[in-house]
Amino acid sequence: MLWVRKYAPKNSYEIINQSDAIKKIKDFILNYRKYEKKALLLWGPPGVGKTCSVYAIAREFGYEVVELNASDVRAARNIHEKLDEAIKGKPFFHKGRIIFIDEVDGLAGKYDRGGASAIVNIIKESIWPVILAANDPWDPNLRKIREVCELVKFKELSNTEIFKALKKIASAEKLEVDDKVLWNLAERSQGDLRSAINDLQTLSGLKRRILIQDLAILGYREREIEIFKALGAMFKASTLSAAKNVFNNVDMDPEEIEGWIEENIANKYEDIRDIFEAYDWMSKARIFYGRIYVRQYWDLLKYYTAIMYGGVALAKSKQYEKFTKFRMPSYVRRLSRSKDIRERLENLLGDLSRKVHSSKKRVREVYINIVYGLIDKHPEVAKSYLRNLGLKEEEIDFIIQNLKSL
Ligand SMILES: Nc1ncnc2c1ncn2[C@@H]1O[C@H](COP(=O)(O)OP(=O)(O)O)[C@@H](O)[C@H]1O
Ligand SMILES: [Mg+2]
C-alpha cells in the first residue's frame, strides 16, 4: 500500500500547517448557502494537503465526497442523469455530500474549452457544496471558474514540518534511518510532502536500514539541493557580488548552471519586462562564452558568470516574494520522469487489487501476466480484458504502454 494513502490524515486535526484553510472549508461546507460565491477553489503547490483535507473533513462531518472526474465534466455539457443525481440527489448513508473536482486546472482547458463552462454549470446547479482544487489558480483556463469561486490558499510546508512527518512514518514503519537522511529528503522535496513520503517508501522497499549514500538510488545528489538553494538566493540578490557568490558551493560547471537558470527565469519572475531583460543578459553571456571558447581564453570565464548571474539577478524591477518551486532543466527532468510513471502504475495496481480483492503481487502474477500474453498477438482482446476489470480507456492505454515496467 502506498504510504501517502496509509498515512493520509484521518481527520482535520492531523493536517499539518493548513489551519486557516481548514477553518474556511469547514465553514463553507456548513454554511455554503449563505456564501455569495457558490464554490471554493483550493489552490497551492502539489503535495501540501488539498485533496486529503477534503476527504478528512468529510469524514469528520459524516459527509460523503462525490468526486467528479474528466468524463463527468465532459458529459456535463449536456445535463446527464448520473451527474444530475450527483449534484441534486440525496445521499443514502451520509448526512451530507461534497461535490469535489480535483486538479481542475487539468480539466478546464480540455474539450475545446467547453470544460470550464461545464464546471461553472455544475457549480450553479449543485444543491451541495462544491469544492475544486488546482495548483495554479491564475491559469488562464480557469478564469471563468475563478469568477464563481472563493479562493482558499494552501501553504507550502516547511522543511521542518516535512522532516517531522517523515520521522513519524519512519518510526511507525520501524525503519532504521538517520535523521540526516530524513532531513535531506525534506529539503529535496521543496515543500511537497507527497513526494517526500514517496521517496522514503521507495528507499525502504530496497533496504531496511537506510544510509545517506542510499539517497543516490533516487537519482538524488547533494548538489541538487545546493542548486535549488543557490537559485533561490540568486533570484533574490540585489548586488552583483551577492549574485555571484551564491554559486560558490555548488558543484556544477557554470555551463550546467546556465541550464538551471534559463529554465527558471520565467518561473520566478512575473513582470514580462523583467523576464525579457533577464533572457537578454543570458544571451549576452552566451555570446561572451562563445568567444571565450573560440579563443580559449578561459581566464575570462569569470566575466561570463558575472554577466549571467548578475544580469539575471539585477534584471528584476522588484522582489518576487512568492514561493517558487524551481524546475530542473528539461533534459534532467526527462530522466526522472520514470519515477512518476512507476508511481502511477503502483496506484493503478492498487486500484485493481481492491477491485478484484487480491494482493498487488497476485494482480501482477495473474492479471497482468494474462495481458502480457495477449498483447502482441491479440491487443484488442487484452484491452477488452482490462476493460472488463473496470479500467478506463486512458488507464488501459497507460498500462499497455508501460507493461514492461510492471
Ligand atoms: N498538510 C498535510 N498534512 C498531513 N499530510 C499531508 C499534508 N499534505 C500532504 N500530506 C500527505 O501527502 C499526501 C498527498 O497529499 P494531497 O492532499 O494529495 O496533496 P495535494 O492535493 O495538495 O497535491 C497525503 O495523502 C498525505 O499523506
Ligand atoms: Mg491533490
Image: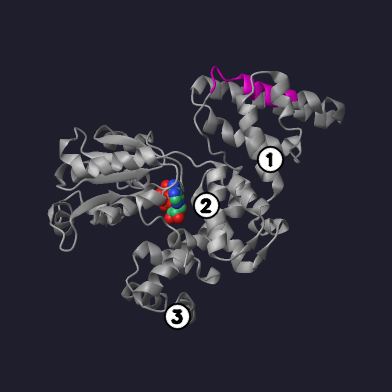
Q: Amino acid at mark 2?
A: Ala
Disc 3: which residue:
374
Q: Magenta region: which residues?
A: 306-319
Q: Amino acid at mark 3?
A: Leu
For label 2, the residue is 165
Does the residue at mark 2 contact the one at mark 3 (Cβ under 8 Å)? no
Is residue 297 visible in the rendered image? The answer is no
> Disc 2 versus disc 3: distance between alpha carbons?
44 Å
CA separation in Å, label 3 and label 1 = 48 Å
Residue 349 lies in the magenta stretch: no
**Mark 1 lies on residue:** 226
- The answer to whether residue 156 is left or right of residue 208 is left
Q: Secondary structure at mark 1?
A: helix
Q: Residue at x 30, y 53 (%)?
A: 70
* SS at badge 2: helix
User: Residue sitting at 30 percent across and 49 percent down?
Assistant: 101
Q: Position of residue 326 (x, y in %)?
A: 57, 38
Between discs 3 and 1, the one toward the N terminus = 1
Report the residue at 36% width, 34% height from top.
140
Is 264 rendered above or below residue 203? above
Q: What whole-number distance in Å separates the C-alpha atoms at marks 1 and 2?
A: 23 Å
